[in-house]
Amino acid sequence: MSPDASLEIQWFAYALADNGLMTDDDATQLWMSLNQTPDLAEFAEAVIDTLAGSMSLEEQDQFVEQIQQLVDYACTQAQISSINSYEDLPGFSDLATVSDEEVRQRMIMLLSGLRRLGCSDLHISAGSPPFVRRLRNVERIDSYVLTAQDAERLNFALLPEDRRTQLREQQDLNLALEIGNDRFRVCLMEQKSGYSGSYRLIADHVSQLEELGFLPKDVVYIKRLLDYHNGLVLVTGPIGSGKSTTLAAMINIINDKRTDHIISVEDPIEIMQLSKNCQVSQREIGKHTASYRTALKAALREDPDIIVIGEMHDLETIENAITASETGHLVIGTLHTGNASNTLNRLLDVFPPSQQPQIRAMTAGSMRGVICQKLVADGFGGLTLIYEIMLNSMAVANIISEGKTFRLESTMVTSNKNGMCTFDQCLLEKFSLGLITRDAALAEMHDPTIIAQLNSLWAQREAKKK
């Protein structure tokens, strides 16, 4: 589209091309053929006149409705394109006086605008001003304190009627919302002041591991974990550390390099995976299956090669995952743990003492590796991913079977050349590559030996500057 056209018309032309209705060149020619510089409504009318001539009356009505949707999309996208700060976001103080449709449009604008501003989460809560999380920091986007009615209207605005009923009956709800090409993981609940909602902005594409912050030398070992045809691979870390994104990247690698059946169970489905070389079946808790444990039991009868479990949080799910990993399936799951040692403790401690010797032996034989990750400040105004990788060697298998997980970190340190690394070693490597500052790295380090190596490397750099 010609750059002389308004932003709304440029977005409208993009939407026409994206929906296969008119090429960008044809839209530009039509726009230029109009005698005066048309506004969006006039241009949309010209598009209808051009394309709807040979349609039946019923088809014309449907086409006009489609064009109106594209006009609405273009107007919204043009407004979003002009958002450069929190001040440009839609306001909240007049919510009591606007229509439900206006509230819905404001939520769309708000979520899309926050993605443009680099925020990761939006929180809408009764009795509190709305706030976001940006680079892990909580930031207020408005000083207005939302009433119970305001919070309910905002949090219900994007929900279909069946989901509204479900939220009122169950008092909490997890789901994924799709707005245009954007997806959001939404958690809604009722609390003492009214309704509260948290909206996680999901990445708009499946990233490569290198894009997420994994170093190329470590990606080699992670990809080797995905070559196994059985065993257990765990991706762990605290909430908000990017586990789901890493999991999606790993599924994508398998999807490209193998020809297998992947069954993924998620709560909710965040990043959509298309079947490429693999057949990918994604199931959502509450929508396609009742729970992780029932989905995992069913999966074993559905001829999978790889089973992906979005969260392993109860004894039955963990037990079934370990069993599946021993019976010819590659099982990839996530846990909310802080490091590799805690991961093994969490995995084993859910079992009663009488079962633990057997489970330790099973885990020692089936465990392929653990990737534990977290996001930290890089000292340059952003975040960087740090991680540790544990691979199952003979030494690690002995540690698991004997229950001596306190020896795991030292084993990982000495196995660095074999693909393992600790958080501190990852920090040192990232500092050596200029991906994190000395102060930011030191704030996360604990190993005195590696701290000494970092300070020595920093001193050498400072000496070269003189």
Image: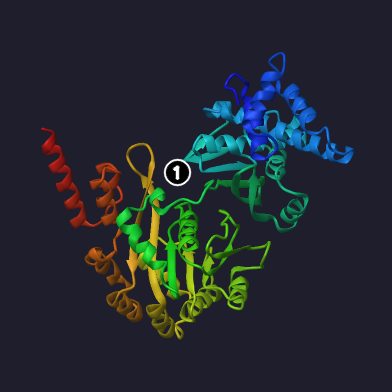
Residue type marked 1: Arg
Q: Position of residue 406 (x, y in %)?
A: 30, 70
Residue 266 appears left or right of 137: right
Q: Which residue is disc 1 drawn over?
A: 136
Q: Is residue 111 left or right of residue 218?
A: right
Q: Which residue: 15% across, 40% down? A: 461
Q: Nearer the viewer, residue 304 or 271?
A: 304
Residue in the image at 66% along x and 68% along y:
290
Q: Is residue 343 depicted above or below 217 in this figure?
A: below
Pinpoint residue 71: horizontal percent, then vertical percent.
Answer: 71, 31
Q: Secondary structure at mark 1?
A: loop
The answer to whether residue 92 shows anywhere in this view is no
**What residue lies at 58% left-to-right and 43% top-to-bottom?**
123
> Looking at this rendering, what residue extends furthest in the right direction?
57
Relative to residue 296, is residue 138 depicted above or below? above
Picture coordinates of residue 18 (x, y %)?
A: 64, 39
The C terminus lies in which quarter of the figure? top left
Image quadrant where one finds the N terminus: top right
